[in-house]
Image (cartoon, rainbow, N blue to C red):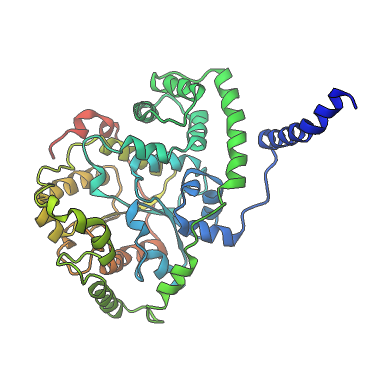
Amino acid sequence: MSMFKRLFLIFGPVVCAAIIVLGFLFSPFRPDKISQSTIQKAALSQSPQVFKGMAVKRAAFKENYVPFFGSSELSRIDALHPSVLAQKYHRSYRPFLLGTAGTQSITQFWQMQGFGNELNNKKAVFIISPQWFVKGGINAAAFNYFYPRLEIVNWLLKAKPTTENRYAAERLLALNPKDSTDEIDDSVLRIAAGQRLTNFQKTYLHLVKNELDHEDQLFSTVSLNNREALIRKREKELPKVYNKAKLDRIGYALGKANTTNNSLDIDNNFWKHKLKPVYKKLAGEQKNFSYIKSVEYSDFQLVLNEFAKHHINVLFIIPPINEKWANYTGLSMSMIQAFDDKITYQLKSQGFTHIANLTNSGTKPYFMQDTIHLGWRGWLAVDQYVNPFLTKKQAKPQYKMNNYFYTKKWQNLDY
């Protein structure tokens, strides 16, 4: 047998397989549509591949799923969590949880780039976490973990050199994503400089988008965090018929039963594993914390512009701080009130009028699950806003967007 034939027998199958895979990735072919069971699992999973992808979200938003934007509070799934209440009481909507620990305004903005028109003129819920609004905004490592290359390529192919896009490009460059490429970085630089992409860059990005679209279709639903059994378990703790007073008593009882090893109304497991080891060191530790001056206000403006662009009617939720914890760490409640006033002005002045402001509820027993995350009675309070907002007809929003909120003057304003 000739050397050529021997080499072909050894390497031929590998080469052929590589050609087939590359052909599939760059071809316009799309796999079958995503099943309802997969969408349901993805809606609860908070898996990074779902957050960074497009296919599952777009399929879900064609159905009755509503995006719930947030961060780590969405992971606190007790019996009164929005996903449990919606399923237990057969609501006309299902929450699609978008966000987990480490996600903030800028990551939410980028993952929104894959929505297409599926959310046009629809509704959404957005939880604003005060602790996002530290001076420098999102941590670069957290941003890199959630870096959505597909969404950014999708954005680049549509981006015009507007104030919004130039700011987004500048922030992207400042965060220095490690999973980017030179070609993508060069394209982002052009947008930041107020220039349009070259024909070569557009051709390159179209090829990359085709490849990433296929990867998203193939892999975004692999190894999803399956929480369906947890939701069913939590449902069993609730009465058959929705009754606010009865549910509040259940929330109180659950909170009391789960906060027995500390005096701060903090969940036992969170206290034992997270706080107890460092508790003494944290006395007065937050007395100089401020959420008033931050680049996050402009990152948040990116999200607001995206909502306005698609005429999405949004309910914003501003959660409180566990006041017992704030008193121990020295976190200023007057500073929290100033943050609340500043973010509320940014919302209302541009036409975002649906705001569930829970800032003053941090003293209520078992309203919070730990230091900053909504818990049992807190989720029930949220439901008093969420359910009517999503199930009843709302007036069409009239947005008046203002580029002033991208300026350093607004970021650093002592409100």
Establish if 184 lies above or below 229: above
Question: Residue drawn at (33%, 44%), measured in percent from left and top?
Answer: 104
Check the image and report above or below for 73 versus 91. above
Q: Position of residue 48 (x, y in %)?
A: 46, 47
Q: Position of residue 27 (x, y in %)?
A: 70, 35
The answer to whether 218 is drawn above or below residue 193 in the figure is below
The answer to whether residue 311 is left or right of residue 22 is: left
Question: Which of 18 and 138 lies nearest the eye of the viewer?
Answer: 18
Image location (x, y in percent) of residue 181: 49, 25
The C terminus, quarter of image: top left
Q: Nearer the viewer, residue 325 or 281?
A: 281
Looking at the image, can residue 214 be seen? Answer: yes
Which residue is drawn at the image coordinates 25% and 62% (left, top)?
A: 272
Is 205 placed left or right of 263 in the picture?
right
The image quarter in which residue 106 lies: top left
In the image, taking residue 36 as reference, residue 158 lies left or right, namely: left
Which quadrant holds the N terminus?
top right
The residue at the point 25 percent across, 29 percent down is: 407
Tell me where residue 284 appears, x and y as whole percent.
Answer: 9, 49
Name the residue furthest right: 1
Is 9 or 300 nearer to us in this picture? 9
Q: Is residue 240 left or right of residue 352?
A: right
Task: Count the labels in the image.
Answer: 0
Q: Residue at x 13, y 61 (%)?
A: 324
Can the viewer see residue 320?
Answer: no
